[in-house]
Image (cartoon, rainbow, N blue to C red):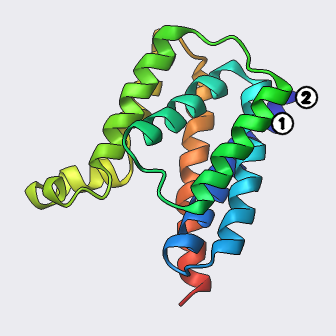
């Protein structure tokens, strides 16, 4: 049963994360970005409760964003608070320290590189690499290959990423 919800919740997390961000950054719509952020925090916390690999990945993303100072809007704060409250209420599954640290470092590197004009001006490959946050994808793939995470967690993370990109595409189509 969880194998139906886990990939769906990864996908919804990615979609809501991006759409919330675009609503805030592009449309300056605080209300809808906060509502979408709260839904994102709720769904992400539930998938973390259901799956320890998801907990490792999403907690690493959260910490990476915090350390990189990328929590920069009320929608991010609403998402963060919702995520923490729901996860505390449901309970955090046991996660291994090694994949958490590796994922955290990868998330942090991706956040430092994303939207970094100094890096982007050096190479179109660096721009592509950090626009699509490949450090995290590579880290999760390596962790799955070495059995720190399940291989399906890598597939689910790619589903998260594809949904994130789809949300950006849909946002642009609906707002042009």
Query: Can residue 46 be seen from the camera position used here?
Result: no
The kind of secondary structure element at disc 1 is helix
The kind of secondary structure element at disc 2 is loop
Q: Position of residue 5 (x, y in %)?
A: 83, 37
The residue lying toward the viewer, choosing from 106 and 89, is: 89
**Label 1 with label 2: CB-CB less than 8 Å:** yes
The residue lying toward the viewer, choosing from 85 and 158, is: 85
Residue 34 vertical position relative to residue 32 in the rendered view, above or below: above
| Residue 4 tag number | 1
Quadrant hosting residue 155: top right
Q: Position of residue 56 (x, y in %)?
A: 59, 23
- Left or right of 39 on screen, residue 64: left
Query: Can residue 136 be seen from the camera position used here?
Result: yes
Q: Position of residue 111 (x, y in %)?
A: 36, 45
The residue carrying mark 2 is 1
- Left or right of 124 on screen, residue 51: right
The residue lying toward the viewer, choosing from 164 and 109, is: 109
Q: Residue at x 80, y 21 (%)?
A: 91
Q: Residues within 10 Å of mark 2 (few under 14, many from 20)?
A: few
Residue 146 vertical position relative to residue 61 in the rendered view, above or below: above
* Gap in angstroms between the C-alphas marked 1 and 2: 6 Å
Q: Residue at x 64, y 57 (%)?
A: 15
Q: Residues within 10 Å of mark 1 (few under 14, many from 20)?
A: few
Quadrant hosting residue 84: top right
Q: Quadrant of the N terminus?
A: top right
């Amino acid at each position: 049963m969880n194998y139906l919800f886990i990939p769906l919740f990864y996908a919804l997390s990615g979609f809501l994360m991006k759409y919330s961000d675009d609503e805030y950054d592009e449309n300056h719509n605080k209300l809808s970005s906060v509502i979408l952020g709260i839904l994102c925090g709720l769904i992400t916390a539930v998938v973390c409760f259901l799956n320890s690999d998801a907990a490792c990945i999403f907690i690493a993303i959260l910490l990476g964003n915090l350390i990189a100072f990328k929590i920069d809007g009320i929608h991010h704060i609403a998402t963060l608070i919702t995520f923490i409250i729901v996860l505390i209420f449901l309970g955090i599954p046991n996660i291994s320290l090694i994949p958490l640290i590796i994922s955290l470092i990868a998330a942090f590197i991706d956040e430092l590189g994303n939207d970094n004009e100094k890096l982007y001006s050096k190479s179109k490959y660096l721009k592509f690499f950090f626009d699509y946050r490949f450090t995290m994808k590579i880290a999760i793939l390596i962790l799955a290959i070495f059995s720190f995470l399940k291989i399906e967690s890598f597939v689910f993370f790619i589903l998260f990423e594809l949904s994130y990109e789809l949300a950006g595409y849909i946002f642009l189509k609906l707002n042009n």
